[in-house]
C-alpha cells in the first residue's frame, strides 16, 4: 500500500515499526538503507500533515477571535 493512502496514525505506527527494526540490528545493510529511506519519507509525510493541520487550527482560532491562543509544537 502506498504511504499516501495510509492514515496519519497508521503512518506513525509504520514509522515506529521501521525504527524498531533498524534499532534491532537484525537487518542487512541493503535492507537497512531501504527501511531508513521509507522511514524518512514517512517522517516527512507526518511532519507535513502536522504542519497543515496546525495551520488549519490556527485559521479556525483566528476566525473565532482567539488569535492570542497558542498551539505548542
Image: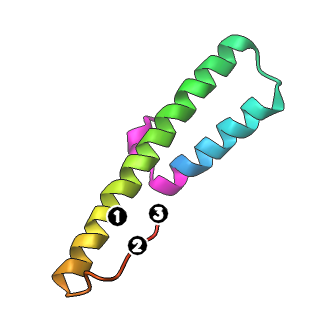
| Snapshot quadrant of residue 25 | top right
- Which residue: 43% across, 48% down? 47
Q: Which mark is residue 73?
A: 3
Q: Does the CB distance between marks 3 and 2 fall below 8 Å?
A: yes
Q: Categorize mark 1 by other alpha carbons within 10 Å: few (<14), some (14-19), many (20+).
A: some
Q: Categorize mark 3 by other alpha carbons within 10 Å: few (<14), some (14-19), many (20+).
A: few
Q: Does the CB distance between marks 1 and 3 fall below 8 Å?
A: yes
Which one is in front, 8 or 44? 44
Percent position of residue 61, x then y: 26, 80
- The mark closer to the camera, 1 or 2, is 2
In reply to whether residue 6 is colored magenta, the answer given is: yes
In reply to whether residue 49 is colored magenta, the answer given is: no
Horizontally, is 69 left or right of 14 in the view? Answer: left
Percent position of residue 63, x then y: 16, 81
Where disc 3 sits, the SS reads loop
Which one is in front, 34 or 1? 34
Which one is in front, 68 or 65? 68
- The mark closer to the camera, 1 or 3, is 3
Residue carrying label 2: 71
Where disc 2 sits, the SS reads loop
- Which residue: 46% across, 54% down? 8
Relative to 34, say whether 9 is above or below: below
- Which residue: 20% across, 87% down? 65
Q: Does the CB distance between marks 1 and 2 fall below 8 Å?
A: yes
Q: Which mark is residue 54?
A: 1
Q: Which residues are magenta?
A: 1-10
Percent position of residue 19, x then y: 68, 38
Horizontally, is 38 left or right of 31 in the view? Answer: left
The answer for how far apart the CA atoms under marks 1 and 3 are is 9 Å
Q: Which mark is residue 20?
A: none
Amino acid at each position: 500500500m502506498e504511504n499516501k493512502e495510509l492514515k496519519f496514525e497508521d503512518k506513525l505506527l509504520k514509522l515506529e515499526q521501521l525504527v524498531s527494526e533498524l534499532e534491532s540490528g537484525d537487518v542487512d545493510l541493503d535492507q537497512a538503507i531501504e527501511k531508513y529511506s521509507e522511514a524518512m519519507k514517512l517522517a516527512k509525510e507526518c511532519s507535513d500533515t502536522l504542519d497543515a493541520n496546525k495551520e488549519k487550527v490556527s485559521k479556525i482560532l483566528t476566525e473565532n477571535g482567539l488569535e492570542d491562543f497558542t498551539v505548542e509544537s
